[in-house]
Amino acid sequence: MGLLTTSILVSIMPKADGNKWVKVLNDAMDRFFINTPYRAAAFLAQAAHESGELCCLAENLYYSASRLMQVFPKRFPTLGKAKLYEKNPGKLANYIYADRLGNGNEASGDGWKYRGRGIFQLTGRGNYREVGKGLNIDLENNPISVEEPPNAALTAAYFWKSHGLNELADDQNNDNDDEDFVTISIKINGGRVGLADRQAYWKKAKAAFNIK
């Protein structure tokens, strides 16, 4: 039996469907040793932020032209360029993800096919292939399956364990847990985007697991 219960889950993520998520999260967390209150609290806090409390499991990419210029200033330096891709998620994904992360060129369609999915937004053909091999699941040929709760949970837990985040989440006498949580956030996001929101969820998660 895993650490997570429906009452714990909804106390951290009120929008989450406990009937849909508790078992698959427990299975994934047990498999990848997210098996202490400290590890579970940090993992679930990050999951809550990254997935909109387990409600958003696929990257949207529906942007206005002005927003594209804010989010991707190097790729869209002019309004004219941005207007070519505004409110067109498929075209945008194929452009911004072309020739990277194991994807083919813009015409290949890989950018949209392998856009961010799952709790931690698995992105790019190469990553779908690599993580699929690690889980012994063919995600490359069935990328949409990452939007399903079992695979969404497994891919997130696999990422967590393979990037050493269990060790960072562990409470140790000679380190700073707050700084470690920031480091976890950076490893997941690549920066400090949404850090205050992540920390708010972490506070709720620690309370749910009776962590002082």
Image (cartoon, grey):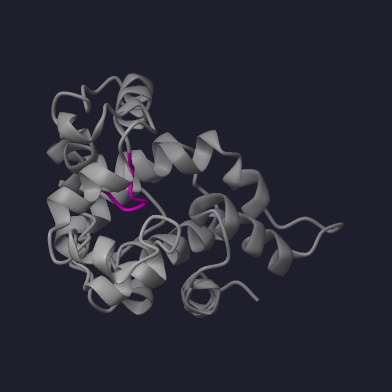
At a point 40% along the width and 64% down the height, the residue shown is: 77
Q: Is residue 121 magenta?
A: yes
Q: For this rendering, which residue is in front, 107 or 7?
A: 107
Q: For this rendering, which residue is in front, 115 or 120?
A: 115
At a point 58% along the width and 46% down the height, the residue shown is: 165
Q: Which segment did they paint magenta?
A: 118-123
- Image quadrant in which the C terminus is located: bottom right
- Classify residue 173 as left or right of residue 140: right
- Residue 85 figure quarter: bottom left
Find residue 126 and report its horizontal and vertical position in percent. Answer: 35, 26
- Residue 105 figure quarter: top left
- Classify residue 186 as left or right of residue 98: right
Find residue 93 and report its horizontal and vertical position in percent. Answer: 23, 48
Q: Which residue ends up furthest to the right in the rendered image?
A: 174
Vertical position of residue 196 compared to residue 92: above or below: below
Regarding residue 74, the answer to whether it shows in the image is: yes
Find residue 80 and report its horizontal and vertical position in percent. Answer: 25, 66
Mainly helix, strand or loop, the magenta region?
A: loop
Q: Is residue 74 magenta?
A: no
- Residue 84 figure quarter: bottom left
Q: For this rendering, which residue is in front, 193 or 70?
A: 70
Find residue 150 and report its horizontal and vertical position in percent. Answer: 21, 43
Q: For this rendering, which residue is in front, 118 or 169?
A: 118
Give the mark count.
Answer: 0
Regarding residue 115, the answer to whether it shows in the image is: no
At a point 21% along the width and 33% down the height, the residue shown is: 110
At a point 27% along the width and 79% down the height, the residue shown is: 14
Vertical position of residue 161 compared to residue 44: above or below: above
